[in-house]
Every structure is written in structure tokens, then in C-alpha cells.
Image (cartoon, grey):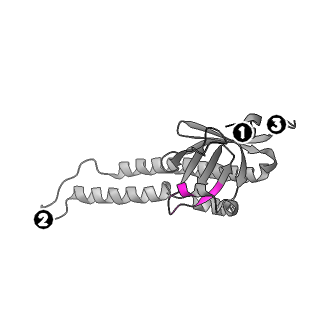
Amino acid sequence: MFNVKDALGTSDICNCLGRAKMSQDPILGYLLPHETAYIMFKSGKETHLFTDLAYVSIRGVTAGTSRRFVDRIEYTETPISDVCFETAGMGLSDRDVEFKFTMGNARISIDIWKNEIQTALGYYRAILIISHEQAKNRELMALSVNALSRLMPTSIVSGPSNEQSAGEAVALQAVKAASFLHRQFAPQSYKHVFEGLGL
């Protein structure tokens, strides 16, 4: 099926949608029940969602097709890195700005209409802050695990059989410490970042 936007090469240039504009979008049906979408980039061909828990992309082969491919990448499993923003030139043919980032092995590029640059920059800042938080948390987790491993005794002598052994006590403390570290340095939700920026 012929589509004018595909022919003009504009079907993948996105508009920025905040929470108020996206509240009725059927795309939100792809999210988990307890998940909140904060940022949406949407074109005729693709949609990019940033929620408090994950990055979700929905893509079609063309702007006219109803068939969509949904891909979801959790922040806790795959950190965001190499976040950058490319502004448009002054020419009439330069219609878009680009927001780029890496998640795992995927380099993701989102084209955005250049007249929406201020909104796009606000969204870029949110993703950049999440990226920085993730890097800091990974570093703190590594330091904490290293310190914890140095505190663990290298040899454990068991106590009487009717009491909890020293090994069991240390193992229990290690599990509690690991759980605490995970809560501190691997947050499930980045709601605080989005809402801290007023998104």
C-alpha cells in the first residue's frame, strides 16, 4: 500500500508526547499493570516509550501497515550508555534532530521533528540522568561486594549441631547484605528521575 510519508521519508520522524498527551494511546496496552509511561516518541512507523521500568519500542515495516513488532528492554537487566543528542542544521532539508543511546548491544537512534527540540532535550536529560545513576550504582555495587567479600571469614568452624552453625549465620548475613545492596544499587523503578524533572 502506498503511503505518502514513506515516500517522503518522514514516516519515521517522531513527535514528542508527554504523559497528558499519551494517556489514551492504545500502545500503553503493551505495558505491565503497575508500570507508568513518562516519555513517548511517536511516528507513523514507530513508537518509543520510556517507562519507570523499561524502554519499549513498537515498530512497523511501513507507516501504513497494522503489523507491529514490540521489543522491551528492562533497565535492571540492560544499562543505558552512550547517550547523545544531535541537533539539526540550518537547511530546509534538515527536518529532524536525533536522540541516540545504547542498551546492551543495541544502538538506538530516534529521529524527532526539529521544532520539538526543547521537549526532546528535556527527555534526553532524563535518560542521561538514568544512565549516570546506573553507572554510579554499578560502581558502588562492585565496591560494596568487594568490601563484603573481604569481611567474610575464609574458614568457618561449625558450632554444636543443635545450634545454628557459624557458617549458616555468615551465609544468612551475606544473603541479607546482598538483598540490601540490590535494593540500594539496582533500583527497579526510575520514577524519581522522571518526576524529579516534572515529566
Q: Which residue is mark 3?
A: 94
Dot 1 surroundings within 10 Å: few (below 14), some, or many (20 or more)? Answer: few
User: Which labelled disc corresponds to residue 3?
Assistant: 1
- What percent of the width, then of the height, locates residue 170? 28, 57
Q: Amino acid at mark 1?
A: Asn
Q: Secondary structure at mark 2?
A: loop
Q: Nearer the viewer, mark 1 or mark 2?
A: 1
Q: Residue furthest left?
A: 161
Q: Nearer the viewer, mark 1 or mark 3?
A: 1
Q: Which residue does the image show at 74% across and 40% down from the upper left? A: 5
Mark closer to the chain start, 1 or 3? 1
Q: Residue furthest right?
A: 91
User: In what quadrant of the picture does the N terminus appear?
Assistant: top right
- What percent of the width, then of the height, locates residue 41? 67, 50
Q: Is residue 179 magenta?
A: no
Task: Say which of 51 and 121 sits in front.
Answer: 51
Which residues make up the magenta segment?
29-39
